[in-house]
Image (cartoon, rainbow, N blue to C red):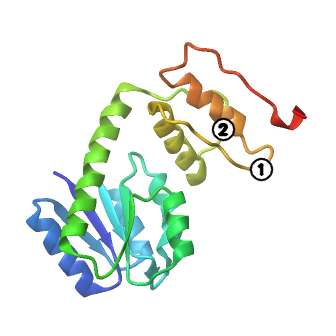
Amino acid sequence: MTRILIIDDDIEACETMASLITRLAYHADKAHSLRDGLGLAERGDYDVVFLDVYLPDGNGLDLLPALKAINEPPEVIILTGKVDPDGAELAIKGGVWDYLLKPTSVRDITLTLNRALKYRKEKKGSAARNELTLTGVVGKSPEIKACIALTAKASASDSNVLLTGETGTGKELFATIIHKNSNRSSANFVVVDCASLT
């Protein structure tokens, strides 16, 4: 059964969301703090997490790396009552599925939820086909696990990928891993050192 977790300190909003999710024939659990939400997320096998940004014990966006580090991490949909353009950008960069502002219509929530579930189903099918080869990657922190999850997405896609970061952060390593795990792995991987170009 599809399992959804709602992390929101607004009890009325939680009840409303749980009611909507139950009417859609999915299972819903609720948490009203970051600590309780993370505890449930780590114990349960959730497909989607609806996450509020402003919670009594911290910022919901700080929970993203921990959620992404979970084995088969859930899709995350931010549902918040306060507009924060910087927070929205940070959330999207952190891999959230969507950023919705309260009050949001039932139609919009349902549409976003169904799209996230469809994407998750396709992603699980793709992950079952390919086990990622991670030669050279060292570390087990939530941040590294989030990078590995993004690397798996990039490897399964035929889209162009832009890797950014400071010198020494492993951009070339992750580019090599993406290439080795992609459909183009039999072709040459050519490294161009842009710093040496005039």
**Label 2: element kind:** loop
The residue most toward the top is 186
Residue indicated by mark 1: 166
Instruction: Identify the disc placed on residue 44.
Output: none
Quadrant of res 168: top right
For the residues labelled 1 and 2, the Cα–Cα distance comes to 18 Å
Q: Is residue 120 above or below residue 55?
A: above
Badge 1 amino acid:
Glu
x 57%, y 73%: residue: 86
Badge 2 amino acid:
Val
Crowd around label 2: few <14 · some 14–19 · many ≥20 (10 Å):
few
Residue 5 percent location from the top left of the image: 29, 65
Q: Earlier in the sequence, mark 1 or mark 2?
A: 2
Q: Is residue 141 left or right of residue 17?
A: right
Which of the pair 6/156 is nearer the observer? 156
Q: Is residue 162 left or right of residue 165?
A: left
